[in-house]
Amino acid sequence: MTTAFSVPEAAPDKALRREMRRRAIAAREALDAQVRHSSTQALCRALDALLARLHPQVLAFCWPYRGEADLTDWIAGWLAAAPDRVAALPVVQASQAPLAFSRWVPGDPMRPDAFGIPVPAKFQPLDPDLLLVPLNAFDDKGFRLGYGGGFFDRTLAARAGLVRTVGVGFELGRVESILPEAHDRPLDWIVTERGTFGPFSGG
């Protein structure tokens, strides 16, 4: 499968990973609004098909950040389709701790967190059974690069075997390899505007 961009092979791994992250975010932020919209719609259709197989009850997602696919309307529709469904957003509680998750209902009051990302104003803890994880750069083995803070790395390690994971992002972030480190864990599936890929880790 072809990659969206390449990086110089001579750089050390950490520098390569930083460059992959930088290029993926820059390309995503530069997307034409109509392309972003149509790609998001295609991504959501693929999510519909995957979730019809997985049947999650408590679904965690991330508020869109730096040009990521905006899933808020899709999540609202998913909630409206069945009364027993629940959605959650991640909440940073400490800089070196795993993420916590708080219930989200469309229209609920929100507040900005330390990074300026909206989170529920009232914290209502939940344990999701499926987690939609944003992708910057990602590869064909299910590995991803986040923003470098390690929040999802710690969260996935803490919840290993307890939550299924689906990476969501645009194809422009696909690379040959993110050069995974020892702590990196593959996601169960990846969903882009081209469809669903995986499972990678027995999900």
Image: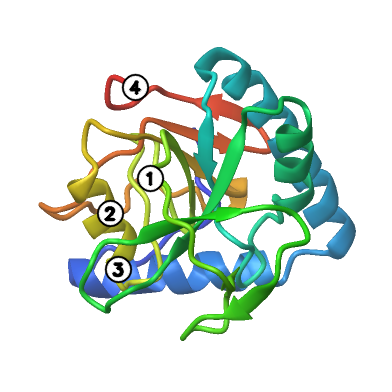
Which secondary structure, mark 1?
A: loop
Q: Residues within 10 Å of mark 4 (few under 14, many from 20)?
A: some
Q: Is residue 154 left or right of residue 85?
A: left
Q: CA distance from mark 3 to mark 4?
A: 29 Å
- Residue 60 circle label: none
> Percent from the top left, x then y, of residue 53?
55, 13
Q: Nearer the viewer, mark 2 or mark 3?
A: 2
Q: Residue furthest left?
A: 182
Q: Residue furthest top?
A: 53
Q: Is residue 163 left or right of residue 39?
A: left
Image height of 167 relative to 115, above or below: above
Q: CA distance from mark 2 to mark 1?
A: 25 Å
Q: Whole-Å distance between the Cαs marked 2 and 3?
A: 24 Å
In the depicted structure, whether residue 72 falls above or below residue 11: above
Q: Is residue 111 above or below residue 175?
A: below
Q: Residue at x 48, y 58 (%)?
A: 124
Kind of residue sitting beneath label 2: Thr
Residue assigned mark 1: 176
Query: Mark 4 — residue?
Result: 203
Instruction: Please give the label number shown on residue 16.
Output: 3
State the residue at coordinates (49%, 66%).
Answer: 123
Disc 2 crowd, CA 10 A, few/some/many (<14, 14-19, 20+): some
Mark with earlier residue (3, 4):
3
Q: Which of 183/18 is in front?
A: 183
Rendered view: 144 above or below 128: below
**Disc 2 target residue:** 155
Identify which amino acid the numbered label 3 is placed on. Leu
